Amino acid sequence: MAHYFAALDVPYPPQPPSTASPAVLALGRALVKHGDAARQIPACVSCHGATMTGVQPATPGLLGLPRDYLNSQLGAWAMGQRHALAPDCMAQIAKALTAADVSAISAWLSALPVLGLGLPVERLSEPEPLRCGSSEGSH
């Protein structure tokens, strides 16, 4: 039965519209697409893929997730409640983000539609900007 359900290609439901201000959404888009080099924050797309649907086998997608979930996961990384194999790149990134950054990123990502089936890509087109223990040797 598990194989049957795992093989289904079920589309993601539409995302609710964001209630964030245009300025907040613009900050979120900028951080996701470009990062902030001055603060050594890489763009989300540089590790999670240009479509933000993840990268096989270990980098998760960021689309289709609720705002509160994204906020809580980034907060858990920043507070040391969530960990990955060393070097823990997400903890490093999350600690560099301000509360306003996290809110903006989660507001922008949670409002984006998941195009197609939201499948992860096989590999990144460029090397990851940080060493990340959870993905070393997998890309």
Image (spheres, grey):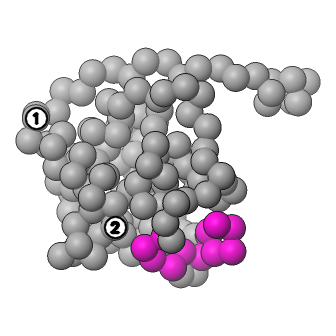
* Residue 133 placement, left or right of 79: right
- Look at the picture and state if 56 lies above or below 89: above
The answer to which of 98 and 56 lies nearer the viewer is 56
Q: CA distance from mark 1 to mark 2?
A: 22 Å
The answer to which of 51 and 85 lies nearer the viewer is 51
Location of the N terminus by quadrant is: top right
- Quadrant assignment, res 113: top left
- Look at the picture and state if 43 lies above or below 30: below
Amino acid type, mark 1: Pro
- Quadrant assignment, res 35: bottom left
Q: What residue is drawn where x is 10% and y is 35%?
A: 22
Q: Is residue 15 magenta?
A: no
Q: Which mark is residue 42?
A: 2
The x, y position of residue 77, in whole percent, is 43, 64
**Magenta residues, start to end:** 128-139
The answer to which of 5 and 79 lies nearer the viewer is 5
Residue bearing the label numbered 1: 22
- Look at the picture and state if 81 lies above or below 112: below
- Look at the picture and state if 91 lies above or below 48: below
* Residue 100 placement, left or right of 126: left
